[in-house]
Image (cartoon, grey):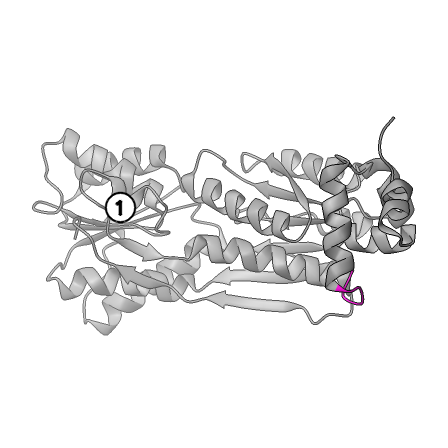
Amino acid sequence: MATTIKDIARQAGVSAATVSKVLNRKDHSIGEKTREKIWSLVKELNYTPNSIARSLITRSSRVIGVIVPDILNAYFTELVRACDQAARERGYSTILCNSDSDPEKEASHLTFLASHGVDGIVLAASDLIPDAHLLERLRIPLVSMDREIPDLDCLAARIDTDYETGAFLSASHLIRAGHRRIAFVSGNPQASNTKIRRAGFERAHREAGLPVDPDLIECGAFNHRFGLVATRTLLDRTSFTAMCCMSDMLAMGATVALRERGLSVPEDCAVIGFDNIYIAPLLVRPLSTIERRISESGYLAIGALIDFLDDPTHPRRMVLMEPTVIQRETT
């Protein structure tokens, strides 16, 4: 017969309510010796909590949903890992959903997570703007990461990156190295994230007294496939000596296209990425990039969400991550 909270309470000589508080990490008023005794019995008796029963009583599943647009992008792989680790450290589990940047699929994921009783949701960077009416109806606490989102009562936090500064630093780094014709490759041209990055790229040129050639701009998607196609298009259309790629995945696609044409990086064309994913320093030519502090962002998002769940009156957290240049061998 399975061990229950009452079994642990009886052997520990405490009430079932005390055991419940310890198991739910709400034990600040309980002495250290009592906590240690309870956790020792949990292990000794091989106690497994009935999460369904507990959620019916507490109205909390201790599960957080994380929705990303492209799990094949190493940026999101690293972000999800950080979110999951941060959640587990706070006694929560995570459910991962991949939207493929499809608004219908994202709406379906939101509805699924709500119907399965998650306590909150992290909406990771995407060009999609969530359906405000759907979010208002679901009323699940949310954290948005690097994306446009309606200002709702259920919005617990926004964790954003200063993309304008990041793109400015990227282009300025190449300009200081002597480059005057620099290609710019980014995501959806209509998305605010791309417009903000392009503004930073153009500001660097303006401050250096350099023109921005429209023929050097290619925007479409933040994946390696578009980086490959965009670079081929640019090479067919014009000449340049450096590339500002607004994601590391774009940069990796770009370097493949450059090699196809017999061009060496950085001798014939310098390349800088954006994100500093874990793969960036492991490439044959370690990639210069813009550091976004991915893991730290994930921890901040989960922390802000759980703080909001613990106390809905907790002030909304608005964090703007400051980027920095990481110079390696491609610039």
Q: Quadrant of the N terminus?
A: top right
- Which amino acid lies under the numbered mark 1 shown in the image of this protein? Pro
Q: Position of residue 282 (x, y in %)?
A: 26, 41
Magenta region, main secondary structure: loop
Q: Residue at x 10, y 62 (%)?
A: 178
Left or right: residue 58 versus residue 111 is right
**Depth check, front residue: 304 or 52:** 52
**Depth check, front residue: 221 or 328:** 328
Left or right: residue 48 versus residue 79 is right
Vertical side of 301 occupied by 42: above or below: above
Q: Position of residue 328 (x, y in %)?
A: 20, 53
**Depth check, front residue: 330 or 224:** 330
Residue 279 seen in render? yes
Residue 152 seen in render? no
Q: Position of residue 140 (x, y in %)?
A: 76, 51
Of all residues shown, which one is farthest toward the top?
A: 1
Left or right: residue 204 versus residue 113 is left
Residue 324, picture quadrant: bottom left
Q: Residue at x 19, y 71 (%)?
A: 208
Residue 30 painted magenta: yes
Q: Residue at x 73, y 48 (%)?
A: 39
The residue stretch that appears in magenta: 27-31
Left or right: residue 73 versus residue 12 is left
Residue 13 painted magenta: no
Residue holding disc 1? 281
Q: Residue at x 54, y 67 (%)?
A: 319
